Image: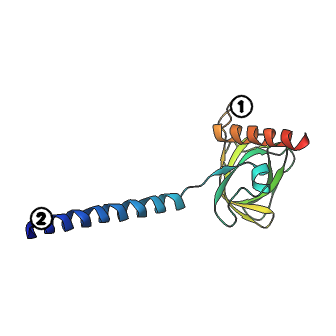
Amino acid sequence: MTPTRKRRLIAVALILLAVGVAAALTVTALSQNMTYLFSPTETLAGKAPPGASFKLGGVVLESSIKRDPNSLKVDFVVTDRFKQIPVEYTGILPDLFREGQSVIATGKMQGDRFIAREVLAKHDESYMPKEVADAIAKAKAAHAAETK
């Protein structure tokens, strides 16, 4: 092998190595920023990552909203109609937030409570986010399998 060919081969190998390292770092960074949606049933079954941020989807349980009169803190319960998780949120809720409506809350579990940093509410009466509908359908299937 001539010295020129050897230098070219080394240069191409270094370029490929650099591209591979950059791709690996990009994939790692993107996977750490992903937040997955879980229903209350899946969360209580341990499928949600412990200590990591994720999205909790379901319906706000009727008669569960409790507001702190001295702050923006709100406690409510999210359910998929099989299991329930208490949620704590401090901030301004969306205008469409109310009991019996679909919500997606982003945050972390702290003990048996979900501490939300963001709450999204559905936009009209006939719409349910696909992720929430899928999570409720999965919970329904899991509940049916448990009762057999």
Q: Which mark is residue 71?
A: none
Is residue 65 visible in this depiction of the protein?
A: no
Residue 127 lies left or right of residue 14; in this view the side is: right
Residue 72 position, x and y percent, is: 72, 61
The CA span between labels 1 and 2 is 69 Å
Label 2 residue SS = helix
Residue 107 position, x and y percent, is: 66, 59
Rendered residue at 87%/44% (across/down): 146
Q: Nearer the viewer, mark 1 or mark 2?
A: 2
Residue 23 lies left or right of residue 13; in this view the side is: right
Residue 10 position, x and y percent, is: 20, 68
Q: How is the image coloured?
A: rainbow
Rendered residue at 14%/69% (across/down): 7
Amino acid type of the residue tagged 2 in the rendering: Arg
Q: Which mark is residue 125?
A: 1
Crowd tier of the residue under label 1, counting other residues whose Cα lies within 10 Å: few below 14, some 14–19, many 20 or above: few
Residue 103 position, x and y percent, is: 70, 45
Amino acid type of the residue tagged 1 in the rendering: Glu
Residue 43 lies left or right of residue 91; in this view the side is: right
33 vs 12, nearest the viewer: 12
Return the residue at label 2. 5
Is residue 47 visible in this depiction of the protein?
A: yes
- Quadrant containing the N terminus is bottom left
The part of the image, by quadrant, that contains residue 109 is bottom right
The part of the image, by quadrant, that contains residue 132 is top right
102 vs 5, nearest the viewer: 5
- Quadrant containing the C terminus is top right
Label 1 residue SS = loop
Rendered residue at 80%/61% (across/down): 68
Q: Considering only order in the chain, which callout, 2 or 1, is on the residue closer to the N terminus?
A: 2
